[in-house]
Amino acid sequence: MIRAKCPASCGELFQGYIDGKNLLISYPIDLFSVVTIKEGISNERLYPKAYNAIKKSLKYFGYDQNEYKNIALDIDSNIPIGKGMASSTADLAATILATSRYLNREIDNQQIANIAIEIEPTDSTIFQKLTLYDYLKGRYKKLYENKLDLKVLCIEGKGTIDTVKFNKLNLYYEKIKHELEYRKSLSLVENGLKENDMHKLAKGSTLSAFINQKYLFKEDLENIYNLAVKCNAYGINTSHSGTVTGILYDKECFDKEKFLYEIKNIINFNKYERVHEYNIIKGGPSLF
């Protein structure tokens, strides 16, 4: 029996269209999908997407794809589905890593990403370090050495978004209008990381969040941002193809109790369902 896990995200620090590429920087949190595989009878009916990853992994390593019929798989995930929290990326990455170990073959995170992106758009949480990544085609990648010394309150909106369908929308002519804004947002995030300036980084992620309001509107986002800053958070980020909003903060400075008390008065809880606190961690799938 082989077990692997991969973390969720609470959206993206940046997502936008630059130089003909659809790019994002998602960040990992301590919420996981855990995949277990062993010899047995396939239960593809329960996990069709994950079994697609098994088949593609078998093909990648030169095995007959029909060998999937002899692999039993189980997924234990606490990641909400359809919220833009990288639940599918976590399932796929953990499955591919577990399959490679099942086959006694080595695989790195770039190879895992190459397999996963054949199935659907892939979040950059698949990499251990924060990464700027072309999430549709996988043809561009830039890794950042600095870590995020932050915590996040993840405000989960009600309802779900079909990420695959959303990313198929032809928004090229709309997004190209905002390329200068995307460049400014990315520059702020990158310089914030380079200088370890979380205020600058969050200014970039906040700008990215508000640009995306044109494509996937989130209720009361401006009110949430204003309250976050009032309570000494650095800023916000959102899932650009989901329903979550992240409050980025330093636990020593942020007045979490005040924020949680006052948030009840400024957002419509018919649109939002819960708030969770997470740590920001290293990304990528791992065996355990």
Image (spheres, helix red, strand yellow):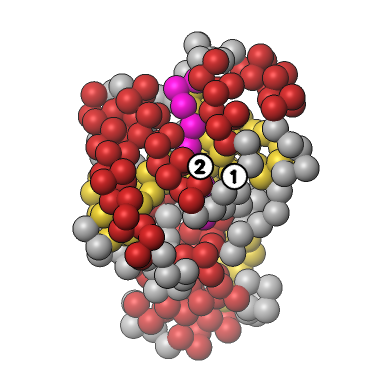
Residue 218 is tagged as: 1
Q: Do labels 2 and 1 touch, CB within 8 Å? A: yes
Determine the CA span between mark 2 and mark 1: 9 Å
Q: Which residue is pictured at 32% across the width and 68% down the height?
A: 137
Label drawn at residue 238:
2
Give the crowd class for mark 1: few <14, some 14-19, many >=20 residues within 10 Å. Answer: many
> Which residue is at 60% across, 76% downward?
48
User: Residue 62 appears at what percent x and percent y?
Assistant: 34, 83
User: How many neighbours does mark 2 have within 10 angstroms: few (below 14), some (14-19), or many (20 or more)?
Assistant: many
Q: Nearer the viewer, residue 256 or 177?
A: 177
Query: For the image shown, how many numbered marks are present on the structure?
Result: 2
Q: Which of the marked residues, 2 or 1, is nearer the chain's N terminus?
A: 1
Percent coordinates x, y for residue 121 in the rendering: 43, 65
State the quadrant of the N terminus. Answer: bottom right
Q: Position of residue 251 (x, y in %)?
A: 52, 16
Residue 30 visible in image? no
- Quadrant in the rendering for residue 202: top left
Asked if residue 79 lies left or right of residue 200, the reply is right
Does residue 71 sit above or below 26 in this rendering?
below
Q: Which residues are magenta?
A: 233-241
| Amino acid tagged 1 | Lys
Q: Is residue 220 above or below residue 211?
A: above
The local secondary structure at tag 2 comes to strand
- Give the residue type at disc 2: Thr
Q: Secondary structure at mark 1?
A: loop
